[in-house]
Amino acid sequence: MGLRLTCQFIINSNCQLSIVNFQLTKGGDWMSVKIRLTRVGRKKAPFFRIAVVDSRMKRDGRFLDILGYYHPLNKKDEDKLKVDEVKALLWMHKGARPSETVRSIFSKLGIMKKFHEDRKRLFVKPQAQVQEQQISQ
């Protein structure tokens, strides 16, 4: 359970942004698409796929896309973990939310850092430009 913030904005003919409706509610997930681990290994030999799934599906159920794999029993560090970074960033920008385990895997690989840097570059600069335009007018 979390908090959901809902805002409605209007952009005037002068390119000024104004808030029309602002609402804060409890509960619910933001998106029904998750990035999580699905188990495909045999008994006592776990092997996981990092998959994009609908959150309402079973743990090992139908998936939308496979981003990589995680083999915890593998001795070599290079073969233990493989993730397609471009696909992972693409799905996260579309709104898919990683589970806690996948989030820690992505953090170790530096994918979460790149995701946050991309979000800063996309969202912080335009807001600063809007504020500068409001000040200059």
Image (cartoon, helix red, strand yellow):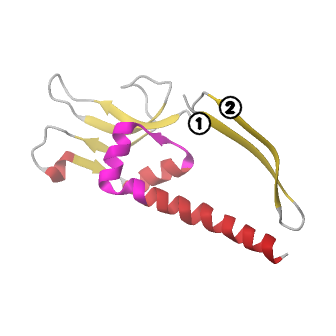
**Compared with residue 127, is residue 76 higher up or lower down, i.e. above or below?**
above
Residue at the right extreme of this rendering: 13
- Give x and y (percent) for residue 87: 43, 52
- Which numbered circle lies on residue 30? 1
Residue 50 part of the magenta-drawn span? no
Relative placement, left or right, of 5 versus 88 is right
- Give x and y (percent) for residue 78: 17, 53
Q: Which residues, given as a range, are shown in magenta?
A: 94-113
Relative placement, left or right, of 42 versus 128 is left
Relative placement, left or right, of 54 versus 13 is left
**Can residue 23 be seen by looking at this rendering?**
yes
Residue nearest the viewer, comparing 98 with 59: 98
Residue nearest the viewer, comparing 17 with 31: 17
The rendered magenta stretch, by its main secondary structure, is classed as helix
Q: Secondary structure at mark 1?
A: loop
Return the residue at label 2: 25
- Residue at the image point whose x is 26% and y is 29% from the top: 40
Between the residue at mark 1 and the residue at mark 2, the CA separation in whole angstroms equals: 12 Å
Dividing the picture into quadrants, the one containing residue 62 is top left
Dividing the picture into quadrants, the one containing residue 104 is top left
